[in-house]
Image (cartoon, grey):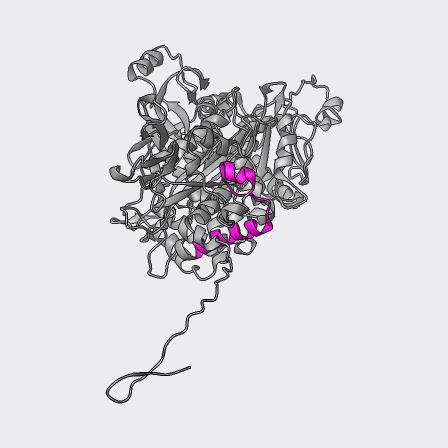
């Protein structure tokens, strides 16, 4: 199977005629374009290709007539003229002979233009655009190995970051990365780049500890600043290599002694009055300060008592004045295990989904999430053109140092993972360090799970490799022709609330049996549903738990897969009634009963009122005459009983062991709902209310195996006074034996 990249795609959301017309007048403005829902990062007034990078639509500049090309047909750092390299500051330039300055004006102006507008170059014959920040990183930033290599992954990273800067709705990025991806150097380079063109501004650095922030400042930020060419380097106060603060301002010494004692006319020097510093890690690190940029390095590794969520709530206010965003945050990290800071970072990452915005057009966190899979940015598997070698190459591919790359990164990664199959915690750590999916990035340690986490992760990995999208259908149920209590049909919809992996054949659909005016399920022998309902439409905080519904088959002679979860519903529609109707339509379509917790009984009363009481199962652990009045009326099972809680958890455990992950016959389970698998992995029996999917799925398992919960009643059998005759069978005739 060939590798399919899904990091970005080129889209055409704007008519070509519109682009052409606007380009002609150079009318495209840098920033968010509401009319076309794109973010323009071009500063030329013209746009070309539009990239969609993880649902963010970014319009690049139009390709210019002339594109820079080297003899090598790839990126190569442009040599800094030796004559200019001797000039260390603006003061050296002022003393430079005027007649020799003229020859360098165009060169310096061009560098400022590239810094602002970005740069086009030929890369393996392809016109390639990098934003100004990326150009500054490649051309003028010194890192641990000298000059950085060009990487396609970094190009896309910087394009995404430029879009974050251009979008007035955005506070910055939340970048989920792999180890050694270069984020620390790239964010350091951006810090220096912005600080050296800003006045009266402050730039801050945070990391998983104060010492890490200090190290980033001294080992990355300061050297990059020192190595800038004189024409990009502002006047600096203090030491050349400061330990705590880099200050771009006029030092007091410039106005004293030599200047004062000389009879020269004192000239007024202008400084930026801009600083870069770092802070110790804590919830209130930059509280009350105004920041133009906050770099958050290793934000997924903040351990208690430090909390990245709390810190972001505080520091977010440092980036705005009222409703106006005046600064940005550059946040990036791999993730620790969930109980070591990973869960907070995961929450922040998920709250930064660009598809989920409030009415102000902002994500929940204000940030935009970006995940670049490890195969895009793994050292040793990136060729001389900066392009990843995903699969075993058919032709010779060479690294920037000339070394031959003969193995694809995906194959290499899979070999590494296979070698760790017997060490699940080691495998999970490898996944977190070098994730190919967000599922990998947030892998937890196996010791923390109530259930068999090895089997759960085996199934998740299998599903990811199987590309679930090809197995699952998303959509909604609706009554045929809008007439209730008739036939139910399933309508595909990418924004639908239902995910299904199996639909019954036509002869099994809508099988409802009518008895004494009450409707009963016709496919009770095929499977059942479990449901975790809710009663209140709205909540004070606008959150509330989701309604959860899961469908599960059991072994039957019908045309259906056995022991398979075939439906998942995890949603909270605007009203509870919409949820109730959704559940009812699913029950009718599949013709299966439902076992529901009766502590939130509105769904059960809804079913009864609509004539579907026969679909609501009674609790299987009690006989009819032992049920309460309410239980007889609407059915359902309580969630308060300790016995029920234990039985519910045991049901899930039984199912996982028998039907999830790698099975005894060498095949994998057929549970394709990763949201459910992840919910099981975190399930806490003492905090059941947080796990909607676990509750509903466990009830579905119990419903399909209700015979296991039938109470054992000892039936008193009456003694029958029957005497059995015995015969003696010797001789010609049998003779009765007298007792």
For the residue pair 435 and 638, the one nearer the viewer reads as 638
Label the magenta part by its dominant secondary structure: helix
Q: Is residue 599 magenta?
A: no
Residues in magenta, as a range: 628-657
Where residue 376 appears, x then y in whole percent? 39, 43
Res 374 → quadrant: top left
- In this rendering, the answer to whether 243 lies above or below 411 is above
For the residue pair 236 and 443, the one nearer the viewer reads as 443
Where residue 290 appears, x then y in whole percent? 66, 25
Furthest residue to the bottom?
Answer: 731
Where residue 510 appears, x then y in whole percent? 31, 34
User: In this rendering, would 615 be left or right of 168?
Assistant: left
Where residue 286 appears, x then y in whole percent? 68, 32
For the residue pair 99 and 606, the one nearer the viewer reads as 606
User: In this rendering, would 201 be left or right of 177?
Assistant: right
The answer to whether any part of residue 331 appears in the image is: no
**Residue that appears at 46% across and 24% down:** 104
For the residue pair 621 and 507, the one nearer the viewer reads as 621
User: In this rendering, would 210 be left or right of 715?
Assistant: right
Number of callouts in the render? 0
Furthest residue to the top?
Answer: 25
The answer to whether any part of residue 656 appears in the image is: yes
Q: Name the quarter where the C terminus is drawn.
A: bottom left
**Residue that appears at 42% across and 70% down:** 722
């Amino acid at each position: 199977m060939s590798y399919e990249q899904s990091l970005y795609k080129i889209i055409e959301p704007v008519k070509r005629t519109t682009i052409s017309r606007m380009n002609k007048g150079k009318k495209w403005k840098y920033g968010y374009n509401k009319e076309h829902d794109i973010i323009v990062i071009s500063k030329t007034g013209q746009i070309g290709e539009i990239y969609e990078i993880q649902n963010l639509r970014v319009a690049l500049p139009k390709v210019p007539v002339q594109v820079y090309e080297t003899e090598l047909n790839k990126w190569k750092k442009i040599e800094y003229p030796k004559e200019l390299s001797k000039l260390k500051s603006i003061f050296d330039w002022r003393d430079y002979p005027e007649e020799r300055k003229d020859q360098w004006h165009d060169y310096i102006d061009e560098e400022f233009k590239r810094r602002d507008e970005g740069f086009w170059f030929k890369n393996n014959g392809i016109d390639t655009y990098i934003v100004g920040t990326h150009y500054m990183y490649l051309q003028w930033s010194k890192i641990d190995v000298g000059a950085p290599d060009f990487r396609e992954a970094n190009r896309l990273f910087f394009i995404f970051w430029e879009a974050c800067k251009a979008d007035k709705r955005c506070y910055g990025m939340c970048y989920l990365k792999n180890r050694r991806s270069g984020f620390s150097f790239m964010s350091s380079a951006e810090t220096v780049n912005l600080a050296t063109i800003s006045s009266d501004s402050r730039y801050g650095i945070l990391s998983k500890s104060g010492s890490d922030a200090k190290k980033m400042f001294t080992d990355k930020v300061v050297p990059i600043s020192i190595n800038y060419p004189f024409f990009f380097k502002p006047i600096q106060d203090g030491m050349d290599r400061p330990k705590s603060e880099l200050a771009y301002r006029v030092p007091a010494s410039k106005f004293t002694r030599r200047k004062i004692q000389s009879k020269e006319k004192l000239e007024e020097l202008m400084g930026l009055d801009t600083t870069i510093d770092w802070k110790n890690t804590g919830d209130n690190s930059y509280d009350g300060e105004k920041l133009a940029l906050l770099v958050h390095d290793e934000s997924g590794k903040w351990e208690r008592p430090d909390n990245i969520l709390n810190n972001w709530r505080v520091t977010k206010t440092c980036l705005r004045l009222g409703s106006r965003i005046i600064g940005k945050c550059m946040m990036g990290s791999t993730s620790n295990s969930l109980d070591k800071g990973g869960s907070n970072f995961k929450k922040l990452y998920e709250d930064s989904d660009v598809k989920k915005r409030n009415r102000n057009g902002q994500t929940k966190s204000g940030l935009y999430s970006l995940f670049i899979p490890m195969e895009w940015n793994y050292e040793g598997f990136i060729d001389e053109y900066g392009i990843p070698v995903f699969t075993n190459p058919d032709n010779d591919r060479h690294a920037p140092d000339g070394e031959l790359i003969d193995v694809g990164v995906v194959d290499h990664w899979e070999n590494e993972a296979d070698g760790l199959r017997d060490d699940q915690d080691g495998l999970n750590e490898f996944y977190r360090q070098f994730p190919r999916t967000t599922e990998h990035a947030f892998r937890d340690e196996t010791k923390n799970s109530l259930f068999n986490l090895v089997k759960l992760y085996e199934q998740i990995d299998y599903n990811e490799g199987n590309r679930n999208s090809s197995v699952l259908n998303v959509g909604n149920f609706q009554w045929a022709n809008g007439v209730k209590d008739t036939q139910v049909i399933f309508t595909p919809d990418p924004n639908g609330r239902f995910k299904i992996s199996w639909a019954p054949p036509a002869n099994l659909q809508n099988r409802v049996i009518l008895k004494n005016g009450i409707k009963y399920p016709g496919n009770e022998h095929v499977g059942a549903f479990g449901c975790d309902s809710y009663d209140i439409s709205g909540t004070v905080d606008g959150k509330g738990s989701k309604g959860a519904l899961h469908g599960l088959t059991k072994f039957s002679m019908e045309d259906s897969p056995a022991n398979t979860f075939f439906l998942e519903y995890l949603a909270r529609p605007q009203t509870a009634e919409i949820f109730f109707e959704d559940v009812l339509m699913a029950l009718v379509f599949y013709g299966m009963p439902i076992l529901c917790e009766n502590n939130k009984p509105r769904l059960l009363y809804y079913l009864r009122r609509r004539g579907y009481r026969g679909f609501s199962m009674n609790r299987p652990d009690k006989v009819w005459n032992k049920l309460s009045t309410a239980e007889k009326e609407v059915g359902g099972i309580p969630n308060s009983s300790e016995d029920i809680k234990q039985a519910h958890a045991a049901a899930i455990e039984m199912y996982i062991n028998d039907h999830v992950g790698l099975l005894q016959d060498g095949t994998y389970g057929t549970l394709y709902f990763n949201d459910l698998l992840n919910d099981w992995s975190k399930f806490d029996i003492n905090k059941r209310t947080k796990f909607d999917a676990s509750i509903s799925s466990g009830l579905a398992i119990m419903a399909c195996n209700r015979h296991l919960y039938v109470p054992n009643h000892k039936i008193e059998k009456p003694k029958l006074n029957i005497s059995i005759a015995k015969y003696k069978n010797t001789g010609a005739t049998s003779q009765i034996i007298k007792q």
